[in-house]
Amino acid sequence: MLGCLACGAVAIHAQSPAPLALPNTAPTVDQVLSLKRAGSPELSPDGLSVAYTVRQTNWDDNAYDTQIWLADTKTGATRQLTNSKKSSNSPVWSPDGSKLAFASDRTDKRQIYLINPRGGEAEALTSLEDGVNGFGWSPDGTRIAYTATEPKPAAIKEREQKYGEFQVVDQEHRMAHLFLIDVATKATRQLTSGAFVVGSFSWSPDGRAIAFDHRVDSSPASSGTSDISIVTVADGTIRKLVTQDGPDVRPVWSPDGSRIAFQSAMANSLYYYSNEVIATVPAAGGTPEALTTAFDEDPSIVAWKQGGIFFAASQRTWSYLYHLDPTSKAIERLAPSDEWIGSSFSLSGDGGTVAFLGADSKSMAEVFVAPSSMKAPRRLTDMNAQTAGWAVTTREVVSWKSQDGTTIEGVLHKPPDYSAAKKYPLLVVIHGGPTGVSRTVPYSSSTYPVDVWVPRGTLVLEPNYRGSAGYGEKFRALNVRNLGIGDAWDVLSGIDSLVAKGLVDPARVGTMGWSQGGYISAFLATHDSARFKAISVGAGISDWMTYYVNTDIHPFTRAYLKATPWDDPEIYAKTSPITYIKQAKTPTLIQHGDADQRVPPPNAYELYQGLQDQHVPVKLIIYKGFGGIGHGPSKPKSQRATMEHNLEWFDQYLFETTPRPTSVQK
């Protein structure tokens, strides 16, 4: 049994978690997956308290359960606030700080609850058949607006009684709309209606209107149709505000209510890999004005306070808070240091204080509080105490030149006893996306056992190949009509760079990845197979044609390959691993979820059969019950399985040892 960090609603100091492993030993898969993790910090309006979540692993129910905690920003004392069955999350303070609204699935569906932060029992505010999505307090604290999917129509229910369930593809979408609930009486009314799906929303400062983004339906392929409208709270009148092409999302009112800021592609159809900008538009209507065209990355709006707009963004492997002056368009980075990874920023009512998650190359995320300048942040939690005594590995950013001269960066993990005079086996772990990014944070992988391998004497390289976020728009576009090909250059040149430095034994190299990382691994398996002793392909694309006709985001493929397979079959063939299947030689593990909608299982079966026909050692594992839109393992037991299957595969084919016994062999 593991030491319990969140066992009671009493004030404790965050130093209490006990180490989960013997001193200076490598953690096990279960120990990494059992780490408690902090998340979702929400600063009270007065800046004196932070509500945040602590997630812990429930192996019995095969779930990650989350509860809400409170931290005093002056004393640093922390205490658990909720202690229910299943999870409580998404805390949101009332405007006067007297209540917390939060979401919980304790009665199965996700509902809104209220609780007094000083203590007491939580009260259910909603009881919807399908639960709620997002929610937010009115400025006067008397109402909460929330979004929810409309109930299944009576006609559909009657049809299912007669014929059973069936799906008419791309039709009969269920819409999601805005609703209002009175906190005192629980009286509820629907605020919007029609053939659209409401996403994020924001109350006007005077509480008379709500700005919201909406798209034509709930399909992920429809993200480019998002527009922004304003609904009058009194009578439900809707007025269109931003209707340009491409996604326009996340509206936020200015403090005086005269303007609305939002994130926008500004009618750019290449939004999958081009920069979004922060734009503003008069609340009364008018022409949007882009404010961040000089900022070469995707900004994510945090808040608009009296002092200006705050946003978050990545820069290379790091991420920071920024301040934007909406008048001069001047942008200032706010960070305690250059090598810093900040996220989940939450500002006080006056914008003078910020709570956030902070991490670096030595520590996984903790909750911090600081002045909004981000100077001298103070840590409120100590989740890293759980790993005290574990073998200390190191992470550093390395760079190299790719085949075409492009500079590529990556994160290199080194074992505790690392010596530059020794040659190590190398495992390459390729992130998904393609606009994902690998960061220098320990214990961040729940699919591949990076933190198990490295202490055992293995180097791990996580390349931020072309297309990765954090390196600017031109870099993200370098794999357009060059998918797989340019990506492979970046991975192989990274390996060559480490070999040339004398750090890596070229006869002991393996690669793996999930999603886009799985696709790149499959591409390497059919192009440069001789370079690798073992390969693992997780939810990877093997054939762009197969992917295009099966996925739930058809526009993605058309954007990156600049064509449909009917218009340009050659580019689909050129960038598909299956085209080169006869070159494959490396033993390959294929992992896939049976319900994957993003990269459907036919991609796995196609690669599996192709490798079988070439007499390449191959194993296909289809995991039951995971996939969906996220298309990766999300429950602890499925993550345990994917990690331990990779341990076994690389033990057998790269390390050439007898596979260690694991729970997945029983």
Image (cartoon, grey):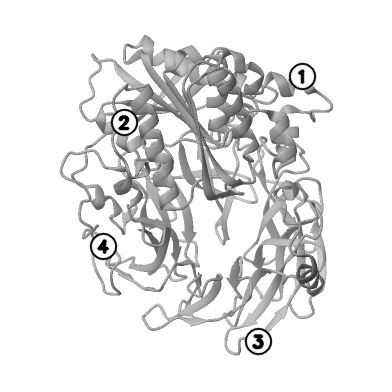
**Labels 2, 4: front one:** 2
Residue behind mark 1 = 570
Separation of residues labelled 2 and 3 (CA atoms): 61 Å
- Counting residues from the N terminus, which is met first, the one under dot 3 or under dot 1? 3
**Labels 2, 3: front one:** 2
Which amino acid, by three-letter code, is at mark 2?
Answer: Pro
Indicate the quadrant where residue 265 lies. top right
Which amino acid, by three-letter code, is at mark 1?
Answer: Glu
- What residue sits 53% from the left and 49% below the top? 624
Horizontal and vertical percent for residue 465? 53, 26
Q: Is residue 361 above or below residue 658?
A: below
Residue behind mark 4 = 4
- Counting residues from the N terminus, which is met first, the one under dot 2 or under dot 3? 3
- Counting residues from the N terminus, which is met first, the one under dot 2 or under dot 4? 4
Separation of residues labelled 2 and 4 (CA atoms): 32 Å
Badge 1 marks a residue whose secondary structure is helix
